[in-house]
Image (cartoon, helix red, strand yellow):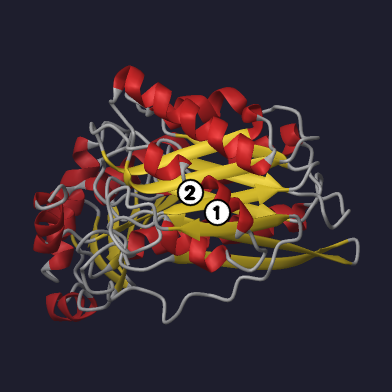
Amino acid sequence: MASSLPKSPLAPAAFPTLLEIDGVKFATISAAVKYQNRPDVMLAKCIPGTSIAGTFTQSATRSAPVLDCQKKLGGSEQNGAAILVNAGNANAFTGQKGIEAVQAIVNATSDATQIPAGRVFTASTGVIGEPLPFDRITKKLTELNANLAPDKITEAATAIMTTDTYAKGAMAVCEVNGNKIKIAGIAKGSGMIAPNMATMLVYIFTDAQVAQKKLQNITTRLVNKTFNCITVDSDTSTSDTLLFAATGASGIDASESTVFESAVQSVMQDLAHQVVCDGEGATKFVEICVTGATDEASAKTHAMSIANSPLVKTAIAGEDPNWGRVVMAIGKSGAPADRDTLSIWFGDILVAENGWVSPSYEEDLAAKYMKSEHICIRVDIGMGSSNMTVWTCDLTHGYIEINADYRS
């Protein structure tokens, strides 16, 4: 494990069983990029015919690996694809050295896997501003390639961790025209999590056959409903990358299947929720549901204002039903709102309505509800019919401890 911290109290009971995805193999190795005596490099190799879609951080200070991956989307599918990820160093804000590191890793991966350099996608996660010791990675590529196997996706999920307290995986199986299709995904993410793509590293694989443009459309649309609706600390990373690989090994075309798209969304949402549940120092998973907004963009603006408010998040950590902080977050968001049409619920408890505390509100009941590990805050704006749900976690002293010592 990358982190010496105890596992998040919100963690799943166990890592899920991820079925093998035909057409992709995985390998991991310890390269000591930063961490000692643990796997910190992951390689995935996909068969010819694999289509690749992706979404990336919108940060103006994107890392060299992100910029390289963005340029390669939409390339020829006939040569397969390779994905190489290292943990411990983000290779971000490293100037020309960062570009050279990416090129060296891409070329070494291409040589080892016999995948053209234009189909090698890399990612780096960890500390920003320190040159990546890429030679520690490149000298491991031959061994990595030799160890590729279809049943090592769980090890891959572990190798890409940084401050994560547990590995994250999700699985779905669906039927398209009577044929089974498998979808498996892994993710890393714990801090520096805020929407603007997907806010972490995420890798999803399916044996379905999906044309690249269609796969990209599906990916972009579903990311906006899942990963772009979570936040831990409102900070967007320089290195966020999501890649979705459709190997086509099943021979089943799922390009137009709504069942397939729904299954992909379930995998993405599962992984997104796991990232929130592993939010640095988190003790509570929080759902923010905004209804009655003038439009969807306004609903999301309100929801994210609540979810990102340090005052709201610390009140939740302290199990204080301080609904006034929710009122504050709505008022400051900048989206249309009217004090006298707002209604606020903590779970099923109506706490405020018509610009004032609800006559039925009992603080003792709300305080009892706030002791739950899973909290739902619902706000009806009372001005329209648009809705949005986002997910976050509380803000505890543990977040400060983790990030005060992050580079040590």
User: Mark 1 — residue?
Assistant: 143
Q: Residue at (27%, 50%) from the top-left corner?
A: 34
Q: Is residue 211 visible?
A: yes
Looking at the image, residue 41 lies above or below residue 298? below
Looking at the image, residue 361 lies above or below residue 66? below
Query: How many numbered markers are drawn?
Result: 2
Q: Residue 32, percent across and down?
A: 32, 52
User: Mark 2 — residue?
Assistant: 140
Task: Residue type at mark 2: give it.
Answer: Lys
Q: Name the foreground residue: 26 vs 217.
A: 26
Extreme top residue here? Answer: 96
Q: Name the foreground residue: 270 vs 120.
A: 120
Q: Is residue 249 left or right of residue 194?
A: right
User: Which SS class for mark 1?
Assistant: helix
Disc 1 to disc 2, how far (Cα)? Answer: 5 Å
Mark 1 nearby-residue class (10 Å; few <14, some 14–19, many ≥20): few
Q: Residue 70, percent across and down?
A: 54, 27
Q: Residue 358, percent across and down?
A: 21, 65
Q: Residue 255, percent across and down?
A: 80, 44
Labels 1 and 2 touching (C-beta < 8 A): yes
Q: Name the foreground residue: 309 vs 324.
A: 309
Q: Is residue 281 left or right of residue 147?
A: left
Quadrant in the picture for residue 74: top right
